[in-house]
Image (cartoon, rainbow, N blue to C red):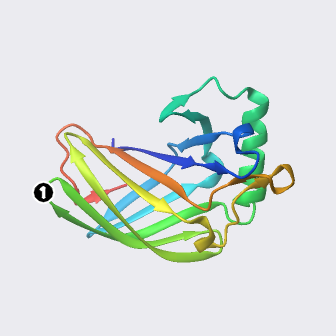
Amino acid sequence: MTSLVLYVFTHRHGLAARLGHDLRLSTRAGRLSLSDGQLELRVPLQSLEVDGAMRRGQLDRTALNDGDRKTILRAMRDDVLEVGRHPEALFRGGVQVAGDRVAVRGQLSLAARTCPLELELTRRGGLLTGDVALQPSRWGIRPYSGMGGVLKVTDAVEVRVELQLEAGQEWPPEKLG
């Protein structure tokens, strides 16, 4: 079975930035399907979890206590993403393969908007990986602001896609999902 992991990296700024954390969030709950060269990815936003804080490019799982994680999740789900109103992210697009590179072009529906999105994945053995920068405000999502506005999250997040293929599986397969 093909497995998918999405990582979301956030960055802080503002006067109180040193009091906050750059974060890594992740989910393994995305549902990926592929038929006739058309890819569809549905991600339940409630499934995003806080992995920890990023420090000098490395994940520190111990930097946040359980209370911190709960506070961050509540703010992310309720205030930033509003998962009660917009429970999932949906990507639909086409796939083009050229050697070990896979170009994915389509539309990402997130919050109340749909915008174009392009991603290039690189295949190394059975692993396809790629990074894409997103500007949440393009989808009508206001970046988090706390402590009276002195601690802010930038209006830029990076999303890393990791798609682990089954042994011997070619990409793209005829059907997936």
Residue 124 falls in image quadrant? top left
From the top left corner, tell me how far across and down residue 54 is, in percent: 56, 36
Name which residue lies at 66% across and 60% down: 87
Residue extending farthest top: 62
Choose between 123 and 9: the one closer to the eye. 9
> Which residue: 67% across, 67% down?
141
Q: Where is residue 60 in the image (x, y as percent from the top left)?
A: 57, 27
- Which is nearer the eye, 133 or 18? 18
Q: Compared to 62, does 114 lie above or below?
A: below
Residue under pointer 1: 99
Q: Quadrant of residue 135?
A: bottom right
* Left or right: residue 141 compared with residue 158: right
Tell me what residue is drawn at x 26 percent, y 70 percent: 36
The outermost residue toward the front is 15
Q: What residue type is labelled 1?
A: Gly
Most foreground residue, 116 or 88: 116
Asked where in the image residue 71 lies, by quadrant, the reply is: top right
Query: Seen in the image, is 62 located left or right of residue 1?
Result: right
Residue 72 can be seen, yes or no = yes
- The location of residue 42, given as percent across then percent down, is 50, 59
Residue 162, given in percent of the width and then of the height, sits at 37, 45
